[in-house]
Amino acid sequence: MPPRRILVTGGAGQVAADLVPVLRKLHGAENIVAAGHETQPSEAVRDGGPFEYVDACSYQAMERLVRKYDIGVIYHLATILSGEGEQNPGLAWNVNIGSLKVVLDLALETNVDQVFWPSSIAVFGPAAPTEDTPQQTVLEPTTMYGVSKVAGESLCNYYNIKYGLDVRSLRYPGLINHKAFSGGGTSDYAVEVFIAAVKEGHYTCFVDSDTMMPMMYMDDGIKATVDLMAAGASDLSVRTSYNISALSFTAGEIAAAVSDKVPDFTYDFVPDFRQEIANSWPNSVDDSVARRDWGWSPEYDLQALVEVMLREIRLKFGKSN
Ligand SMILES: NC(=O)c1ccc[n+]([C@@H]2O[C@H](COP(=O)([O-])OP(=O)(O)OC[C@H]3O[C@@H](n4cnc5c(N)ncnc54)[C@H](O)[C@@H]3O)[C@@H](O)[C@H]2O)c1
């Protein structure tokens, strides 16, 4: 049987910049179709295999793509992130939920029989426990991004129960990467601090120094995604979305860890509207269900993260400081 072709939406985004090359290596470059929207993807994503543009909210456009390539699996990454979502809540709802509904309905009508869709720690709001937030708890987010993720999780669960669709999901924490910086997220400061340290020598952080949230190096996020999609369907007890966890540190701690390695780096903290979003999210999450069901475990701790990020950002910008 020929390998099943995979479609990755949000192909110009941060997660796709790392996921698409990994999937191309695993399944063959010609079998992975990356689809962007209005922004330019990285060269590796655009030139490393089939690349298309699509509005993921358009059923017709998505159907054309799925039929053209005889797609069997969709990684649906197209989104409006939390910061941009609070600036434009209507757009966040329409894209995040509208496109997910398109993907799920399309899966029922075509040969697509497996869907991956990321949720987020943004599903938790101020009413949820902030430390070791459990897999199942109160979900009352105070951002439109979080609202769309809670609705999306329920939609995925519904399509699994009602139609038997094999849809799988992870609640990603803030993902720290060096390949694509699209902005618009509330955890962006944990990437910006590295770029600013290497390029400018100073960083003004948009949340307070004691702001803590769950974070993860992108390689661990990609490993979790690939491992979840490879797990036996009967091992999965969660069809809303799995908590996964790796690191929790404050904005002050990451700035200090960078400062230890970059001489003369200075930083300060001037919170903007994203402070309120960050305050509504947990400090850490309990991922014991993911560990039990499909053997999840992260590889990168804070020290390893700082080392790899500094090395890669210096290489990217041709700096040696
Ligand atoms: N990056 C993180 O830290 C993080 C954390 C938690 C969850 N997630 C989730 O992971 C997934 C990928 O996030 P990301 O960080 O790569 O986001 P991103 O913003 O970098 O990429 C999303 C892409 O979706 C595209 N898009 C927007 N509207 C579209 C439309 N109508 N049709 C098609 N594409 C459209 C954008 O152009 C963008 O390139 C999302 O579901 C996001 O909610 C990401």
Image: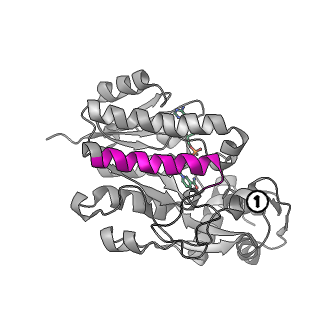
Type of amino acid under label 1: Gln
Q: Position of residue 244 (x, y in %)?
A: 46, 67
Left or right side of 268 for 177: left
Q: Nearer the viewer, residue 317 or 253?
A: 253
**Number of disc labels:** 1
Residue at position x 33%, y 74% in the image? 292
Q: Label 1, on which residue?
A: 275
- In this picture, which residue range is highlighted in magenta? 141-161
Q: Nearer the viewer, residue 282 or 271?
A: 282
Say above or below: 118 vs 56. Answer: below
Residue at position x 57%, y 48% in the image? 147
Is residue 203 highlighted in magenta? no
**Outermost left residue:** 1
Is residue 148 highlighted in magenta? yes
Q: Which quadrant contains ligand 1?
A: top right
Q: Nearer the viewer, residue 226 or 110?
A: 110
Q: Nearer the viewer, residue 59 or 319?
A: 59
Asked which secondary structure carries label 1, the reply is helix
Quadrant (top left/top right/bottom left/bottom right) for the N terminus: top left
Q: Position of residue 17 (x, y in %)?
A: 51, 47
Q: Is residue 117 visible?
A: no
Q: Position of residue 194 (x, y in %)?
A: 71, 62
Q: Position of residue 105 (x, y in %)?
A: 35, 33
**Label 1: few (<14), some (14–19) or many (≥20) C-alpha neighbours in 10 Å:** some
